[in-house]
């Protein structure tokens, strides 16, 4: 028994109070008294006794009602209440217990019985409190453990996905670089041979012209042949045809150059890289998505390139960052276009602005990629870099683009990748790469 336990007597009968008071004080308890249910409730706003002895028959609110109110209040609901009553019939005892009392004692009070019951309930109460505390602690520990487990599971999934992704990208990079290399040779000699081919053809045309001058009447067979092949048309068309073949070959050459720049396998060490080449090669690869179609005109690309030094970096990885940011910008424009007609889009055209500059104070290069698409709301901005966060349809987006881009910029290049966006004004992503 704790001698300092505080017992609260609630009774209107002074004789009863006196008897109980003396008994409890003599047994080492601290004692508090109230003469009505109302004053008891009021006192309990500022003190928390360990047990309440509650009389049933009192003027004002009776013991049952007092008990009901105390049990309804979270601050007092757990304090054990023992009813004291002259009513010894079973109905009133059951009623008291139903209201939430832990026990009852009948008047006239039997001293030893009162003390025995009080001590039992104090012990039970303390035990219950300890138990509850223990349960609470264990629950907390368990939910902490569960949360940790969940977090590490998520992290594991994320790193697995990123690993698979980067392995895929590097395998794809090697493949693309290989194919681009294979294309380069034949395209190279096509381009190399087209010039002499044009010259030879011009020579042959000259020769034919000379023949025509020297032999104006070459005979029926030749005349019929000239007519059948429509020599005048061939003479006019063949140079144009060769010119377009030349242009086509040059375009293939440029694309394969870009593919090689884009997919440089460079995971081992950093190397000096012309950032503008990286952006341009990425744009060329995305050309099919930027070109006009039946729903909209071309997406405008506004380049505002500053003077940049070569940047020591992993070029293939930075290109992947440009690719993800530009692909997202195109997606955001397509989303905005969804409810607009061709004419409406033409009136306020889709546009991606790319600005680069060197920051000589902080010794960094800054690349900004800005679109005038749907933009990103403030609450979404908190989550866009989370792996697997996507607002795109299933199968369209994996939600990894920005997570990977951030990883490459921040972890691999010690840089920064930030988003500035207002929902009405499109989105801007700013990359900052330190110059080492
Ligand atoms: N330029 C942007 N304009 C508007 N919203 C954007 C832009 N860039 C990213 N977002 C938002 O951020 C989300 C996450 O982008 P992230 O690139 O990580 O994934 P994703 O594009 O959905 O899928 P994935 O790139 O893997 O194909 C997008 O789903 C989109 O809601
Ligand atoms: Mg993306």
Image (cartoon, rainbow, N blue to C red):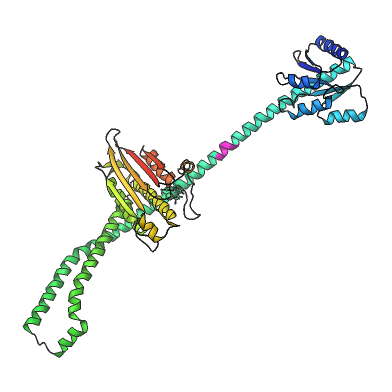
Question: Taking 59 as reference, is 211 above or below it?
Answer: below
Residue 10 in magenta stretch: no
Residue 283, can we see it? yes
Image point 49% across, 41% down: which residue? 379
Q: Is residue 147 magenta?
A: yes
Relative to 205, 304 lies left or right = right
- Magenta span main SS: helix
Q: Is residue 430 above or below residue 14?
A: below
In which quadrant is the C terminus drawn?
Answer: top left
How many numbered circles does the render carry? 0
Residue 40: give x, y in percent of width and height.
77, 20
Instruction: Specify the segment rendered in magenta.
Output: 146-150
Which one is nearer the viewer's eye here, 114 or 66? 66
Residue 29: x and y in percent read 78, 13
Q: Nearer the viewer, residue 48 or 327?
A: 48
Quadrant of the frame with the N terminus? top right
Q: Residue at x 85, y 28 (%)?
A: 96
């Amino acid at each position: 028994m704790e001698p300092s336990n505080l017992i609260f007597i609630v009774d209107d009968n002074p004789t009863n109070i006196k008897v109980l008071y003396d008994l409890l004080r003599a047994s080492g308890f601290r004692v508090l008294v109230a003469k009505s249910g109302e004053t008891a409730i009021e006192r309990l706003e500022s003190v928390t006794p360990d047990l309440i002895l509650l009389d049933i028959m009192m003027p004002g609110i009776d013991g049952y009602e007092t008990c009901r109110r105390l049990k309804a209040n979270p601050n007092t609901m757990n304090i054990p209440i023992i009813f004291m009553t002259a009513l010894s019939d079973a109905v009133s005892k059951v009623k008291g217990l139903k209201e939430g009392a832990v026990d009852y004692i009948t008047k006239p009070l039997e001293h030893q019985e009162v003390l025995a019951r009080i001590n039992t309930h104090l012990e039970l109460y303390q035990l219950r409190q300890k138990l509850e505390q223990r349960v609470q602690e264990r629950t907390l520990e368990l939910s902490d453990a569960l949360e940790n487990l969940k977090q590490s599971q998520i992290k594991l999934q994320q790193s697995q996905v990123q690993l698979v992704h980067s392995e895929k990208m590097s395998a794809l990079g090697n493949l693309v670089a290989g194919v681009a290399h294979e294309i380069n040779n034949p395209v190279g000699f096509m381009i190399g041979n087209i010039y002499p081919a044009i010259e030879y053809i011009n020579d042959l045309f000259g020769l034919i012209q000379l023949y025509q001058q020297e032999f104006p009447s070459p005979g029926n067979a030749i005349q019929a042949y000239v007519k059948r092949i429509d020599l005048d048309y061939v003479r006019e068309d063949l140079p144009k045809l060769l010119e377009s073949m030349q242009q086509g070959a040059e375009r293939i050459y440029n694309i394969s150059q870009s593919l090689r720049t884009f997919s440089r396998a460079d995971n081992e060490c950093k190397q000096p890289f012309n950032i503008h080449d990286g952006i341009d090669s990425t744009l060329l690869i995305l050309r099919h998505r930027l070109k006009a179609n039946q729903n909209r005109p071309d997406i405008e690309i506004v380049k505002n390139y500053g003077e940049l030094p070569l940047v020591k970096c992993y070029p293939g990885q930075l290109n992947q960052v440009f690719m993800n940011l530009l692909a997202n910008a195109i997606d955001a424009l397509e989303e905005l276009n969804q409810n607009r007609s061709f004419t409406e889009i033409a009136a306020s055209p889709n546009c991606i602005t790319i600005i680069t500059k060197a920051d000589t104070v902080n010794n960094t290069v800054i690349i900004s990629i800005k679109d005038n698409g749907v933009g990103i709301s403030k609450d979404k901005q908190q989550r866009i870099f989370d792996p697997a966060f996507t607002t795109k349809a299933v199968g369209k987006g994996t939600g990894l683009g920005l997570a990977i881009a951030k990883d490459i910029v921040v972890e691999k290049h010690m840089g920064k990748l930030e988003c500035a966006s207002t929902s009405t004004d499109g989105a801007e992503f700013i990359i900052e790469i330190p110059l080492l």
